[in-house]
Amino acid sequence: MNIQQQTINTIRVLGIEMINNAKSGHPGMVMSAAPMMYALFHDHLNYDVSDPNYLNRDRFILSAGHGSALLYATMYVAGYKTLSTKDLKNFRKFSSKTPGHPESTMLAGVDFGTGPLGQGAATSVGFAIAEANLSARFDKIVNHYTYCLIGDGDLQEGVCQEALAVAGRYKLNKLIWLYDSNDVQLDGRVENSTNFDVEMLLKSYRWNYILIKDGNDYQAISNAIAQAKKSDKPTFIEVKTKLGFASSVENTNKAHGSPFSDEEIKNIKAKFDYKNKPFTVSTEVKNHFESAISRGLKAAEEFNQRLAKAKPELKEKFITQIKEEKINFPKSLINEFNVDQYDSTRNLFGKVFKELTKINDNILVVNCDLSSSTKVVTHNNARFDHGHYQNQFVDVGVREFLAGCIVNGVVAHKGLKAVSSTFMAFSDYNKPALRLGAINKLSSLYVYSHDSFNVGEDGPTHQPIEQLSALRLIPDVLVYRPANFYELYIALKTAFDKKNHKPVVISTSRSEFDLTKVNPKTFDEGYYYLNKTKSPKLRLIATGSDAGTALKLAKIFKQEGIDIDVISVASFKKLKEKLADLEVLKEFKKYKNIVIESGVSNIWFEFVSLVIGVNDFGLSGNPNEVATYFSMDLESLVKSLASILHKNYTQQKIEELIKNAN
């Protein structure tokens, strides 16, 4: 048996030993796709065993994340120093470096943590876009490929189709997908649900398509990858394999997700004439990967040489943007925008963000055909395209899920920041990517405009009610609903801070309201006063555009000699962090606190006993009509607060108070 086949079989056996030892896992893909992994890692992938996360390495994403044992076994055989025999034996164990699905935060060399099918493939498009942009802007100092291994389930996910469309549109020719096409799924045959022609599909998306009929022909796979690297399009290599190859359940769904028995593994080893003890690799196989390790080290050295030879200004920019991950915030922003003004926060965001992109070309915008409404645009809207990869504005069409995946890929690549935007009501399309970004500890930025029922005539499908609270409940996601420039400024500073490893959501309004100037010395992300009195009868707590309403209410009741404090909460998570201190919480609860927020109220009852909110779907009508329907218009709110304060105002009195306060 030649050394190539020995190495492939070693990867296979290590993988199924890991699964058997863990008593859980997915052996089918380990057996079917090992020749692909061997061909890629041994013949093509540029990686540096001494620095597995160096910038210009080739990227590999295992979109079929359930096949993680295959990835760990391959990395171990390929010489990655971040993995030990102990790590292989700890597969799927608590807090191990080798969890059930790959996690980039647990193991250096894993480029992206995957699991939900389709997302790894979609995210690989973000990696490829990042490489294309950096290569164009830095004179090909950055120059690498992005590879992705997918399965049948990936290809069935809608986001995968979105990814194919966009990658083909932009001719991302340094993106190569390997498809483990084994015709079997967890519940049975792929043909039970899917019968499209893969080649016709891929060619319609403007991809280069290559078919390998024998999944065990590693040389044919390697030749296909070499051919793909010469293409002017992204390449899709379909490799026909047999799930659970060499096992008694080969080519059946029984091979998918259950460990092989000791007897089964014994029989497989006999078929392979495999003599190694469990969890060991022969000296011959270890030595066989020396050429791949040397190739990776040479590629790393060539990258360092290109950087060293770069023009001084380009080299300085490279270090600032990529190594230091710096985003410049000009001091003029605070002077220009931290003023009392009447505007919507979406408009304010647009003005500020244009200024940022003017001086930071390392921020990409992934546009879902809504930039004219969300106002998330660059200073010149120069569009990223084939031949113009240096530009910042990436159109992906009405594909919110994909946009989130691309943002994750761009940020995970390193060297760039990325933002996508849509209406708050459609944040649900983004949410799976947002969640996976949080798990991967990525500082992705999402901007959701039209963040309340005040969008009016578009009706309940476009009026967000539960979305803001739902976003706040996702662990490790920072949600900001700014009530003024300074809160927006802090949200952006947090999103683009190198030390931040959490996705940031900025919720912006369509409606215009009074945006107040904030004294940075009195600002607190947990909560702070927009209006403070000596002896308040109650305190109104609000976020975003509702803070403008709260300030109006304070002004109205001031006419009656009734003092009301107004508190703004920029981020609910920051409020929770602040109130985790029992003394601070005790002080907070001394007052009669009332929350006003144009969304579901449940989340606030942890800290207050009264919330004026919206707990039902909206309806079509102009914003004032809808507000009145929900009793969230100014007149209804005055009545509510008057009742709480035991004031019996006539209708005429209420109308006079409102009129005089304007």
Image (cartoon, rainbow, N blue to C red):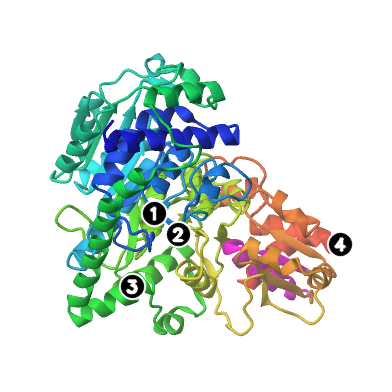
- Foreground of the two, 312 or 350: 312
Main secondary-structure element of the magenta-colored stretch: helix
Answer with left or right where residue 423 lies relative to residue 636: left
Q: Mark 1 sits on what residue?
A: 407
Question: Of marks 1 and 3, which one's residue comes earlier in the chain?
Answer: 3
Q: Mark 2 sits on what residue?
A: 445
Q: Are marks 4 and 3 in contact (CB under 8 Å)?
A: no
Dot 2: within a 10 Å radius of its alpha carbon, few (fewer than 14), some, or many (20 or more) residues? many
Q: Nearer the viewer, mark 3 or mark 2?
A: 3
Amino acid under disc 4:
His
Q: Which residue is drawn at 42% across and 84% down?
A: 331
Q: Residue at x 64, y 72 (%)?
A: 661
**Residue 310 in sight in this render:** no
**Residue 185 in sight in this render:** yes
Q: Which of marks 4 and 2 is in front?
A: 2
Amino acid under disc 3:
Gln
Q: Give the range drawn in magenta.
A: 539-560
Q: Mark 4 sits on what residue?
A: 646
Question: Of marks 2 and 1, which one's residue comes earlier in the chain?
Answer: 1
- Foreground of the two, 268 or 312: 268
Per the image, label 4 sits on a secondary structure element best described as loop
Provide residue 266's location: percent of width, then percent of height: 49, 24
Amino acid under disc 2:
Leu
Q: Mark 3 sits on what residue?
A: 321
Q: How far apart are marks 3 and 2 (CA)?
A: 17 Å
Question: Of marks 4 and 3, which one's residue comes earlier in the chain?
Answer: 3
Provide residue 539's location: percent of width, then percent of height: 76, 69
Per the image, label 2 sits on a secondary structure element best described as strand
Q: Does the magenta stretch include residue 487?
A: no
